[in-house]
Image (cartoon, rainbow, N blue to C red):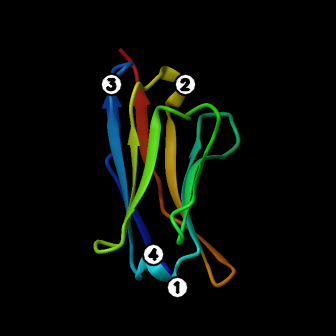
Amino acid sequence: QVQLVESGGGLVQPGGSLRLSCAASVNIFTIYTMGWYRQAPGKERELVAAITSGSKTNYADSVKGRFTISADNAKNTVSLQMNSLKPEDTAVYYCNAVRDGMLYWGKGTLVTISS
């Protein structure tokens, strides 16, 4: 069983930055992939960024060059640094983990980009 707790969401103006964190209840060395997904109102949940246990990363085209995913193995956390935020980045952001063939989700954190 893996529990994931997100933090760091909030309201920020366009062009601003936010840093989301996801704390895992297990050593993240044991997790194959961790990622961030988001779901905007009326839209499907989509992958934002992911990182494997081997530190391979991938990003949605819409966030490349603006968002950076990273893992802190000592703290068992995965973070998402979000820069140059746009109104279309507004969504609930969910942390995700794949471990031993099981999929786990956090409860989400709301990110609102508005002036």
Query: Secondary structure beneath disc 2?
Result: helix
* Lower sequence index among marks 2 and 3: 3
| Vertical order, 21 against 72 (above or below) | above
In this view of the protein, which residue sits in the foreground, 76 or 65? 65
Residue lying at 51% horizontally and 30% vertically, measured from the top left: 89
* Lower sequence index among marks 3 and 1: 1
Pointers 4 and 1 in contact (CB under 8 A)? yes
* Lower sequence index among marks 4 and 3: 4
Query: Secondary structure beneath disc 4?
Result: loop
Q: Amino acid at mark 3?
A: Gly
In this view, the mark in front (4 or 3):
3
Q: Amino acid at mark 4?
A: Gln
Q: Which residue is mark 1?
A: 1
Gap between marks 3 and 1, in whole Å?
35 Å
Q: Amino acid at mark 2?
A: Glu
Q: Which residue is mark 4?
A: 3
Q: Position of residue 81 (x, y in %)?
A: 38, 43
Pointers 3 and 1 in contact (CB under 8 A)? no
Query: Image check: 115 left or right of 44?
Result: left
Residue located farthest toward the top when viewing the structure as drawn: 115
Please identify the quadrant where the C terminus is shown: top left
Query: Secondary structure beneath disc 3?
Result: loop
Location of residue 15 by image quarter = top left
Pointers 2 and 4 in contact (CB under 8 A)? no
| Vertical order, 79 against 72 (above or below) | above
Gap between marks 2 and 1, in whole Å?
33 Å
In this view, the mark in front (3 or 1):
3
Q: Position of residue 87 (x, y in %)?
A: 49, 21
Q: Which residue is mark 2?
A: 88
Q: Which residue is mark 3?
A: 16
- Give the mark count: 4
